[in-house]
Image: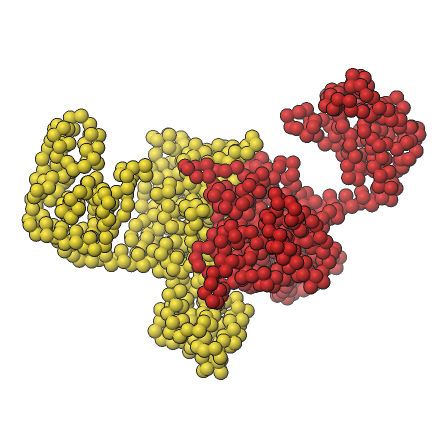
Chain colours: A yellow, B red
């Protein structure tokens, strides 16, 4: 079944090439592979441009080709010269020239069109459901993905076995598009980018910064309450620090280049752990101080490839709610890991995330045989694996195991977030580390006065602020819970006579630390409401004569039909309580 | 008078060389200049080391020389060769060799000792008050200040006209030393440095970070209340951004070197203004949005020379409470500057700082003739000066004027902080800028639909968090007001039977968001109190039988003799109120 849909998609890419050549006879073909849920084909259209309307026409043309019940005939050519004569344009020729000598070169023929293709294809277009595919979009794409090459036109299509599957997928796409944090981030004025500042470096507006601040305060307060020591360490350090930690060779490719001044080289930090270890080592430590839970909202820098950057999901600088828990021994570490998972699940539940549905744990294991990728210490790897697995099992939570996904210094538990499109991504991790205590000589004096080596847990509780906000924007579709909403109340004046009272009301909310804005513009109330609804503001107050002459408010609650009639003081109490409770729902 | 004390100091440096040569006959002399309040002399002592005791002996020896009523005779030598023969060691010879040809080379002779010296000296040691000088300390110093050269021994001395002046200065030094933020920072465990992280890059402990967090929350909340939009922008940007702003040529020397990756160069930002302007320019702006007050706790990077670095006062990375207020015109700017001074004085008074005594304003003016240092626009400079002077005059506050101290883009008001030693330093500034609006095309649409140019105010409200903490540590001598104290309450158990109750109490304080710690160690109560007093903790609770069996507390209040007898609930209410009021005094 799965295999067959791949054949269908491959065949549709073949038919798309036929359709494009019918419409643009001078087009040169590049490649046309199958991808997740569909297929694409790259064309060099010369001077021609492709429009939305063209897509519909091409779709129609493909449907016509399907109705012709064309057969796909495979043929093998052994001679490169013969193969070169059968193909259209320089790109296919380049592909053939790159084939190893004596390679069997396969072609598929249908109707009067033959294409270089390794297949497989369906036997006949009869096997393709013409109501279950769609051409979705076009994009520019460099030949062989190299920006030094020619820019080609890529046409994307999606295809399923049934129309129902297609419709469901389209609905999901539409929903994902509506929730896309890049789109909502712009519409809700949360963040922006500047070409002069650089790619992957978001500039947060006051509204976006309010969300950040609420999240940061939430996590710092919660962690301090749970015995973490929140510190503040520099975002740069001398290269020697990362050479000592071993990050430099392992992470070099994703680190920014060194800053060379005088005789020194400074690095933008990709990790905060070496900084925290230096702080721990700044004086002798006793067993009474352990577990020593150092935490920081740590700004980190990783130079992601330009093509990898996606809104706030993948950026070149981010703020990680980071921590390194320095433990006396593996038994203390085990108990701390359990505490960390308690914290993580508390944070997730505050956001209204459910295990299984919105996130899950993944146990990422090392590979003792791969001593190049992983630190060599068989006994320690075995122990670390056992501890993490034990903790997860004892909690009776579902988790998957992933061999070969560990950090170079130890086994880890990944917090896997599920996106709107159903894809899973590692949001952050909890790691068991027996390597850094050696490298940094992280020791303590035990109750007998003896020096002992520690064990370190690396962990986040919420991940990178940027990524969690991207995720939450999509999860809430921009309608944040009250405590996170950049604006909590908007006051809309009906006429000019109501302006003064609106301002008085605004002051009253501000006194109570409620984030409020007033729209005094000379527009219709309908217009003002429409704008405020688009801003996804939790509570709207329309202020006319009736409201001005009493303490009664008629409150429009986001997402509710019914108007809430309530006294001003009661309303302020209500908001206060919902904020304090970090309530997920409005009332 | 002033001139005469310089002669005395010069002569003492000469006598010190004599005394050192008496004690260390093989010593080679380097240089011995006069400095503020005293003098020093650099020696190459070979294998010999100098001790505290030696300093006393040298002092005695100098006193003996003074009693001999030695005369200082000046002589001039015109011939380098002759001069070379008169001096001791390679350093003096190097100095002579560097003199221009035909330079008159001056020597001073006293007793049997002749020294190369430009003088002036007193005529006779009779003019030196032997009770009004003191040798204070020794330090290592490279010959000619270059670390590639030999390390010499520098001996410092201070000297005044009268013993009274000396005693007063010594008392002040002692007080300054006790309050030195570097010393207190270590004793109170607020911050540390790591050679692997780098010079001038402090690592803040949990206690220091608590002070930072309180200050940051205070300033952000206060600014948001006053209509600022707190944003968050990247600490790095492409070099082109600073070329556009003009910072790159002007500030190049104090910027970190570029980070070169792919075809781009990134810079650690020395200023946040270009970032804020990019945010402002991310969409069209209307007159309704002005004044547009963008604020940020902005991390900035300036590569100070290694010799300039001093604890937290001068660092290589700091967090500035920064803001750029984009105004419609100069009249709006004037009113905003007045608001800024209101905010600054509110913040200063919250810290208990008094204008005149602890800080003052300085109006720093440009120089229209110096078009290399200052942007050329005579009319704009005149207007800016007038506006700032007007605001200061109207507030009837004392200020001094400082020509040639402006920023390259405009006139500024400096907030001058006075240190414990009486020295004045610019803590932060309020600047009037008519240059950046041109460079960044900062415009808005007025109520007629026309595009207009803006005026920008650059300002801080509290300065750099690092520097203000350094200043406050010294101002409070480490005894922070309750709201800023890293720990607010410490509970000390008398015996093991009281431990459980102490823990219960601790939980009660924590519930009420009071920063508390409990000392359950098996030591004497006296010992525990002594330690807690050194930590400068506001309130100490000793818990014995009496306290355990009632709700009464016997509270030791920092800096007070009397014990405060109070019920637990009342005590919590009291603390709560003092924190909320940001009270400067304990009760």
From this viewpoint, is residue A514 visible? yes
- Residue B145 against residue A510 in the figure, above or below: above
> Which residue is painted at 7% across and 46% down in the image?
A70
Relative depth, front residue between B117 and B98: B98
Residue B99 appears at what percent x and percent y? Answer: 74, 24
- Residue B506 against residue A94 in the figure, above or below: below
Q: Within the image, what quadrant is residue A305 found in? A: top left
Q: Within the image, what quadrant is residue B71 found in? A: top right
> Which residue is painted at 43% across and 50% down in the image?
A194
Residue A71 appears at what percent x and percent y? Answer: 7, 44
Q: Is residue B346 left or right of residue B135?
A: left
- Residue B185 against residue B142 in the figure, above or below: below
Q: Is residue A252 left or right of residue B314?
A: left
Q: Is residue B524 left or right of residue A387?
A: right
- Residue B340 against residue A364 in the figure, above or below: below
> How many circles with numbers are drawn on the protein?
0
Q: Is residue B76 left or right of residue B207?
A: right
Quadrant showing the C terminus of chain B? bottom right
> Which residue is painted at 83% across and 45% down in the image?
B168
Q: Within the image, what quadrant is residue B256 found in? A: top right
> Which residue is painted at 35% across and 71% down in the image?
A560
From this viewpoint, is residue A441 visible? no
Residue B336 appears at what percent x and percent y? Answer: 59, 62
Quadrant showing the N terminus of chain B? top right
Relative depth, front residue between A207 and A450: A207
């Amino acid at each position: 079944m799965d295999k067959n849909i791949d054949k269908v998609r491959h065949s549709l890419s073949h038919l798309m090439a036929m359709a494009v050549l019918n419409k643009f006879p001078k087009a040169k073909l590049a490649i046309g592979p199958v991808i997740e849920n569909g297929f694409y084909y790259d064309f060099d259209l010369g001077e021609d441009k492709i429009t939305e309307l063209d897509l519909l026409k091409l779709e129609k043309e493909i449907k016509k080709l399907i109705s012709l019940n064309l057969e796909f005939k495979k043929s093998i050519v052994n001679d490169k010269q013969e193969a070169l004569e059968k193909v259209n344009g320089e790109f296919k020729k380049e592909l053939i020239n790159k084939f190893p000598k004596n390679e069997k070169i396969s072609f598929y023929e249908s109707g009067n069109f033959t294409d270089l293709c390794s297949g497989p294809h369906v036997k006949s277009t009869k096997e393709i459901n013409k109501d279950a595919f769609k051409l979705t979009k076009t994009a520019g794409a460099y030949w062989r993905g190299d920006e030094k090459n020619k820019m080609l036109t890529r046409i994307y299509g999606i295809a399923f076995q049934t129309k129902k599957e297609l419709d469901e997928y389209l609905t999901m796409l539409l929903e994902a598009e509506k929730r896309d944090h890049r789109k909502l981030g712009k519409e809700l004025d949360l963040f922006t980018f500047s070409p002069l500042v650089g790619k992957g470096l978001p500039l947060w507006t006051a509204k976006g910064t309010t969300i950040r601040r609420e999240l940061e305060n939430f996590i710092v307060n919660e962690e301090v309450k749970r015995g973490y020591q929140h510190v503040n360490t520099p975002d740069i350090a001398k290269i020697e620090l990362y050479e000592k930690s071993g990050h430099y060779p392992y992470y070099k490719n994703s680190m920014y280049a060194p800053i060379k001044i005088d005789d020194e080289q400074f690095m933008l930090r990709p990790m905060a752990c070496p900084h925290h270890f230096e702080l721990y080592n700044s004086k002798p430590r006793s067993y009474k101080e352990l577990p020593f839970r150092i935490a920081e909202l740590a700004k980190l820098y990783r130079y992601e490839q330009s093509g990898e950057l996606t809104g706030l999901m993948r950026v070149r600088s981010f703020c990680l709610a980071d921590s390194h828990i320095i433990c006396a021994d593996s038994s203390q570490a085990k108990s701390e890991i359990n505490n960390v998972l308690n914290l993580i699940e508390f944070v997730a539940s505050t956001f209204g995330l459910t295990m299984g549905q919105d996130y899950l744990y993944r146990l990422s294991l090392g590979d003792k045989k791969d001593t190049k990728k992983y630190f060599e210490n068989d006994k320690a790897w075995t122990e670390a694996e056992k501890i993490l697995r034990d903790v997860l099992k004892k909690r009776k939570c579902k988790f998957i195991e992933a061999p070969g996904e560990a950090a170079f210094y130890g086994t880890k538990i990944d917090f896997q977030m599920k996106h709107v499109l159903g894809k899973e991504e590692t949001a952050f991790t909890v790691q068991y580390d027996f390597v850094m205590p050696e490298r940094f000589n992280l020791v303590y004096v035990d109750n007998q006065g003896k020096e002992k080596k520690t064990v370190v847990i690396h962990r986040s509780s919420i991940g990178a602020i940027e990524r969690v906000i991207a995720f939450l924007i999509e999860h809430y579709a921009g309608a944040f819970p009250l405590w996170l909403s950049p604006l909590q109340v908007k006051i809309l004046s009906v006429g000019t006579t109501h302006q003064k009272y609106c301002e008085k009301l605004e002051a009253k909310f501000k006194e109570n630390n409620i984030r409020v804005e007033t729209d005094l513009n000379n527009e219709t109330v309908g217009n003002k409401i429409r704008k405020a609804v688009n801003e996804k503001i939790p509570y709207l107050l329309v202020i006319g004569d009736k409201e001005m002459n009493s303490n009664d408010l008629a409150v429009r609650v986001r997402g509710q039909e019914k108007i809430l009639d309530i006294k001003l003081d009661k309303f302020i109490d209500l908001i206060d309580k919902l904020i304090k409770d970090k309530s997920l729902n409005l009332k």
